[in-house]
Amino acid sequence: MRRRFTLDLTPLRTSRDFRLVFAATGVSGFGSFITYVTVPYQVAVLTHDPLLVGLLGVCELAPLLLMAFVGGALADYLDRRLLVLGGELAFALLTGVLLANTLTGRPHLWLLYVVAGLTAAIDGVQRPALEGMTPRIVPPEQIPAASALSSLRMQIATLAGPALAGVLIASVGLSWVYAIDLATFAVSVICLAPVRALPPPPEAERPSIRSMGQGLRYARSRQELLGTYLVDINAMLFGMPQALFPFLAAELGGPAVLGLLYAAPSAGALLATLTSGWTARVHRHGLAVTLAAAGWGLGIVGAGFARTLWLVLFFLVIAGAADMVSGLFRMTIWNQTIPDRLRGRLAGIEMLSYSTGPLLGNVRAGLMARWMGIGGSVWAGGLLCLAGTAVLAAALPRFLRYDGREGVRRKEIEDAEAAAMTRQAGSPLR
């Protein structure tokens, strides 16, 4: 019975390349979340202006929106391992720039914005290749377990990285913080170097506007894919409350509880990941995503109505766990069913779906708070999430009925047909 709920470690045991990628991205991700906290802190120290801190997000959004499509096309045309390795080297270079900027004694503010934008652009190029590696290094039946392990890696980084950043900033200074992040990229490159090459399929298309459009057309033709994007965007657009956490903390105990509010959803996500063994036995993936999105909305509604700190934290933990369950099944749908020749381009679309929702959701939360107050904005957003989830479920019946076993069989047929066409095109004329 316990095995049914515990984390499945099979990909780590059976796939050498998955172990190396898991270690590389885990270490560098941990360092990146240290810097994720440190750069806004440095801008705040230099400017004492919250608006200028917020402009970091504006600098990141445009490069991310553009380069996610470019990165997706490149991931389908080039060796994905080399793209990921090149991304780690580029991140290391930018971290070195942050370190050098701090060591000057009079750091340049403009350089922090430039690095933020370049980091987002590189992430847009690297992330589709990284996500496209999973179906190439583990068999289809292990993808749910691999998705859970990848989520665990991310959750540990999001919890431990910012916590350590605060300690380091207070104790050793910014230059040492950036130096530690730089060291994590060195470890990542060492781990990635032995990973076997992952060349593109023979029928890979050269990156172009047309090839990017092909990815969009394929996504539009598959209702189960559209469902994963739209359900998640709906949940984050209406239910994301993070912009209100500083004001909610002021009502519940002051700055001392702010960190608890940010940590609660991540704690729920970590709990869901550690008990995710049962997900491999669920095949109605579309229904699972829909129910999990509704669970997120219910958790947010509860947090909005709660009036005590422990109850707010409880509902945020529930919401975070539900969101992670949704994420696990969305990743499974993507990795088990998308043809390898399109995996990078679809990963770019996926990246946009889960990146833009939270940003727009925080804007929604702030605007509604002006009219409904902090708690009202939270619970109203949760109710809108539930309503939107119900509408999408009714509008996307094939998504709701989607069975993962049928998706795997269809991918096998599509890959076989593509391979046959490639062989036919390459055969000599008789």
Image (spheres, helix red, strand yellow):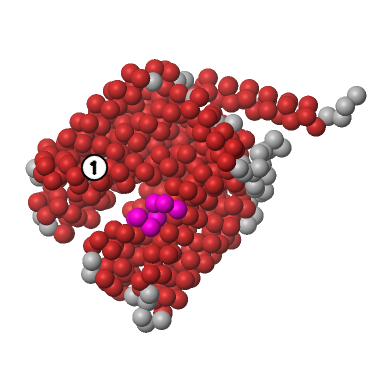
Secondary structure type for disc 1: helix
On the question of residue 283 being in view, the answer is no
Residue 355 placement (x, y as % from top left): 38, 45
Q: Position of residue 368 (x, y in %)?
A: 17, 42
Quarter placement of the C terminus: top right
159 on left or right of 190: left
Quarter of the figure with residue 321: top left
Question: Does the magenta stretch mainly form a helix, a strand or a loop?
Answer: helix
Please state the horizontal and vertical placement of residue 55, each as a whole percent of the image: 31, 59
Q: Nearer the viewer, residue 176 or 357?
A: 357
From this viewpoint, which residue is outermost toward the front?
209
- The image position of residue 353, as x and y in percent, is 40, 39
Q: Nearer the viewer, residue 385 or 267?
A: 385
- Is 59 contained in the magenta span? yes
Q: Residue furthest bottom?
A: 105
Residue at position x 26%, y 46% in the image: 362
Disc 1 residue type (three-letter): Arg
Label 1 packing within 10 angstroms: few (<14), some (14-19), many (20+): many
Where does the N terminus fall, quadrant-wise?
A: top left
Residue 82 counted in the magenta span = no
The number of numbered discs placed on residues in the rendered structure image is 1
Q: Is residue 209 positioned above or below 59 on the image?
A: above
Q: Which residues are magenta?
A: 57-63
The answer to whether 32 is drawn above or below residue 291 in the figure is below
Query: Can residue 212 be seen in this snapshot?
Result: yes
Q: Which residue is depicted at the point 42% across and 22% down?
A: 399
Q: Residue at x 28, y 63 (%)?
A: 52
Q: Residue at x 37, y 76 (%)?
A: 107
Which residue in the structure is indicated by mark 1? 364
